[in-house]
C-alpha cells in the first residue's frame, strides 16, 4: 500500500498541484494543499487512491476558496476600502508576458460554469471518464458532452479576450 | 450515412471508448471527409485547450520527498494523541471539579439539622417539648441512654421524628443529673466551635431560658439559635446563660452572659477559641479566651456581669458579632 501511494505521489503530485493551482491561483498554497492531500491519503489508505486524491484535492480547494472569500471580506472590512488585485512587479519581460497569458486563461476559466470547469480540470489532470463521472456525479456518457462544451467555451472565451486586447491596443495606438 | 456525434469524437480522442468503438470510428472516418474534418477540428481544440491550461500552471513545482510526508503524518498523529490525552485529562478534572462544586454547593445550601430544629423565635410547642425534656429521667432509664443532640424536638411519645433521626447525626450519650439537667458525656459542642461545658447545665427552650434568668437573654440577631444552656450560679440570682448559634458557614458561636467570674472561668476553658467580651460599660476586649478573661479586670471581682461571644472565629469577627447582640 505504501509503495502504491509512493508511486502515486511521484506520478501524480505535479498534476494535483496544477489542479489545485487552477482553483486557488497561488502556487505555494497549491503545493501545501497537495502535500496535505497526500498526507491524508497516507492516513486513510483509500481503495482507489488516484480518484480519492483528486476528490480530496477538489474539496480542499473548495474550502480554501471559501476561506479566501472570508479573508477578503474581513480585509475589506478592516481597510474600509475596496480590495485591489495585487500585481507583482515583473522581473523580466517573459514573466510579464506569462502573467498576462495566465490572467487571460484564468478569466476564460472563470467564464465557464463550475461543472464545466471541474470536468475540464479533472480531464487535464489525467482522470478517465468514469473517474470524472464518479467525482462529479455525471453519467459517464455525459462526460464527453460536458467536456466538448467546456473546451469550446474555454477557447471561445480566450479568443474573445485576445480580440478585446487587440482592439484595445489598436484604440490605444 | 450516419455521422459520428461530436461528443463521441471527443471521447474517441480522449481514449475513453472501447476498442471496438474505436475501430468503428476509425473505419468511418477513413471514408467520411466531413467526420475526418470534424475529428481534426476537435483534435485541434483539444490541443489548444491543453496548451491554454499549461499556461495556467505554476512556473515551478516543489515537492517534498515522500518520507518527509510520512514524518509529517507521524508528527500529526503524535500531536493528536497528545491533544486527546490533554482533552481527556481536562474533561476528567472538569468532571471532578464540577462534582466537587456541586457537592459543596449542596452542602452550603442545605440547612444544618440543628438550625432546622430550632429557630431564633421559639414556638410554643418548642417550649412544651423542651419542658418535657427537662423533666427528671425515670428511674428505669439506664444511666447511659442514647439521646439526640442539641434541642432536637422530641415527640410526647418519646420517638424522634423520622427526618430528624436521619439528619441529627450520631446520638450522644447523656448522663442523667439532678434537677433534670443533662450532663453531656463528652465535650458536647453541637457544632464546630461550640464551647466546652462542664458543671451542671440545663438545656432549655428560649422561653424557658427567659423565665429562668428573669431577664433578657443576649444573642446575635439574625443567626439561628441552636441551643440555650443555663447554669445556676453558686450565689443564686440570674444564672449563667450560653446561647449557641450556628452560622451559615457551619461555624458555631456562643453568646455567654453571666457573672463576670463565671464567664471568665468558662472562657478560660475554651482551648483554641477566640472570644470577645464586654463588661458593662467597659470597652470591647478581644483576643484569646485567656486574654479576654484577664483583660477585663472587674471580671474577677464576681459582682459585675459580663457578656462574651466565643467561637473558632477571628477576634475581629467576634467583635462584629458583638455589635449585633440584642
Image (cartoon, coloured by chain):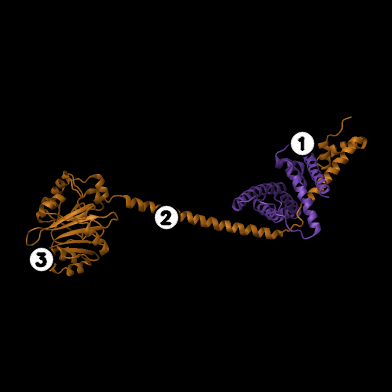
The shade of chain B is: orange
Residue A125 seen from this side: no
The residue lying toward the viewer, choosing from B223 and B81, is: B223
Expressed as whole percent of the image width and height from the top left, the position of residue B180 reads 11, 53
Q: Chain of mark 2?
A: B
Q: Earlier in the sequence, mark 2 or mark 3?
A: 2
Whole-angstrom CA distance, mark 2 to mark 3, is 54 Å
Numbered label attached to residue B97: 2
Expressed as whole percent of the image width and height from the top left, the position of residue A168 reads 80, 47
Q: Quadrant of the N terminus of chain B?
A: top right
Instruction: Using a 10 Å C-alpha cutoff, classify the residue at mark 2 as few (fewer than 14 neighbours), some (14 to 19) or many (20 or more).
Output: few
Helix, strand or loop at disc 2? helix
Expressed as whole percent of the image width and height from the top left, the position of residue B59 reads 77, 56
Residue at 27%, 48% in the rendered image? B166
The shade of chain A is: purple
The residue lying toward the viewer, choosing from B146 and B70, is: B70
Helix, strand or loop at disc 3? loop
Whole-angstrom CA distance, mark 2 to mark 1, is 62 Å
Q: Tell me: A119 left or right of B193.
A: right
Numbered label attached to residue B302: 3
Residue contact between numbered discs 1 and 3, judged by CB atoms under 8 Å: no
Q: Relative to B183, does residue A70 appear above or below in the rendering?
A: above
Task: Give the image quarter of residue A116.
Answer: top right
Amino acid at each position: 500500500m505504501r509503495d502504491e501511494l509512493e508511486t502515486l505521489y511521484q506520478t501524480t503530485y505535479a498534476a494535483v498541484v496544477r489542479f489545485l493551482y487552477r482553483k486557488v491561483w497561488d502556487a505555494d498554497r497549491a503545493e501545501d494543499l497537495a502535500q496535505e492531500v497526500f498526507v491524508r491519503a497516507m492516513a486513510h489508505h483509500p481503495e482507489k487512491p488516484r480518484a480519492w486524491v483528486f476528490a480530496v484535492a477538489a474539496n480542499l480547494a473548495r474550502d480554501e476558496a471559501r476561506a479566501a472569500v472570508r479573508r477578503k471580506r474581513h480585509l475589506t472590512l478592516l481597510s474600509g476600502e475596496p480590495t485591489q488585485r495585487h500585481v507583482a512587479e515583473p522581473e523580466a519581460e517573459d514573466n510579464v508576458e506569462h502573467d498576462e497569458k495566465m490572467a487571460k486563461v484564468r478569466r476564460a476559466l472563470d467564464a465557464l460554469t463550475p461543472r464545466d470547469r471541474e470536468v475540464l480540470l479533472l480531464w487535464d489532470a489525467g482522470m478517465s471518464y468514469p473517474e470524472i463521472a464518479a467525482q462529479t456525479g455525471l453519467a459517464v456518457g455525459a462526460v464527453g458532452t460536458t467536456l466538448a462544451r467546456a473546451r469550446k467555451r474555454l477557447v471561445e472565451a480566450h479568443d474573445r479576450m485576445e480580440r478585446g486586447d487587440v482592439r484595445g491596443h489598436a484604440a490605444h495606438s | 450515412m450516419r455521422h459520428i456525434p461530436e461528443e463521441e469524437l471527443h471521447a474517441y480522442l480522449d481514449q475513453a471508448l472501447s476498442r471496438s468503438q474505436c475501430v468503428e470510428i476509425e473505419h468511418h472516418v477513413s471514408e467520411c471527409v466531413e467526420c475526418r474534418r470534424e475529428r481534426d477540428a476537435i483534435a485541434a481544440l483539444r490541443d489548444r485547450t491543453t496548451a491554454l491550461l499549461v499556461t495556467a500552471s505554476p512556473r515551478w513545482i516543489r515537492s517534498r520527498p515522500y518520507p518527509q510526508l510520512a514524518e509529517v503524518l507521524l508528527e500529526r498523529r503524535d500531536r493528536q494523541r497528545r491533544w486527546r490525552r490533554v482533552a481527556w485529562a481536562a474533561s476528567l478534572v472538569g468532571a471532578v471539579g464540577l462534582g466537587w462544586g456541586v457537592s459543596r454547593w449542596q452542602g452550603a445550601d442545605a440547612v444544618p439539622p440543628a438550625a432546622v430544629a430550632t429557630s431564633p423565635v421559639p414556638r410554643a410547642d418548642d417550649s412544651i417539648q423542651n419542658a418535657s425534656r427537662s423533666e427528671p429521667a425515670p428511674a428505669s432509664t439506664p444511666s447511659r441512654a442514647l439521646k439526640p443532640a442539641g434541642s432536637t424536638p422530641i415527640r410526647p411519645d418519646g420517638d424522634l421524628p423520622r427526618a430528624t433521626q436521619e439528619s441529627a447525626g450520631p446520638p450522644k450519650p447523656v448522663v442523667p443529673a439532678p434537677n433534670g439537667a443533662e450532663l453531656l458525656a463528652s465535650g458536647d459542642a453541637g457544632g464546630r466551635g461550640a464551647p466546652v461545658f462542664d458543671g451542671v447545665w440545663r438545656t432549655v427552650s428560649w422561653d424557658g431560658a427567659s423565665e429562668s434568668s428573669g431577664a433578657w437573654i443576649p444573642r446575635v440577631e439574625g443567626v439561628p439559635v441552636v441551643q440555650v444552656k443555663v447554669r445556676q450560679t453558686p450565689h443564686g440570682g440570674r444564672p449563667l446563660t450560653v446561647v449557641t448559634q450556628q452560622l451559615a458557614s457551619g461555624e458555631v458561636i456562643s453568646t455567654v452572659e453571666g457573672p463576670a467570674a463565671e464567664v471568665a472561668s468558662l472562657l478560660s476553658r475554651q482551648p483554641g477559641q477566640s472570644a470577645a467580651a464586654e463588661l458593662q460599660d467597659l470597652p470591647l476586649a478581644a483576643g484569646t479566651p485567656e486574654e479576654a478573661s484577664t483583660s477585663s479586670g472587674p471580671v474577677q471581682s464576681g459582682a459585675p456581669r459580663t457578656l462574651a461571644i466565643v467561637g473558632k472565629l477571628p477576634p475581629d469577627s467576634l467583635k462584629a458579632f458583638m455589635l449585633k447582640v440584642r
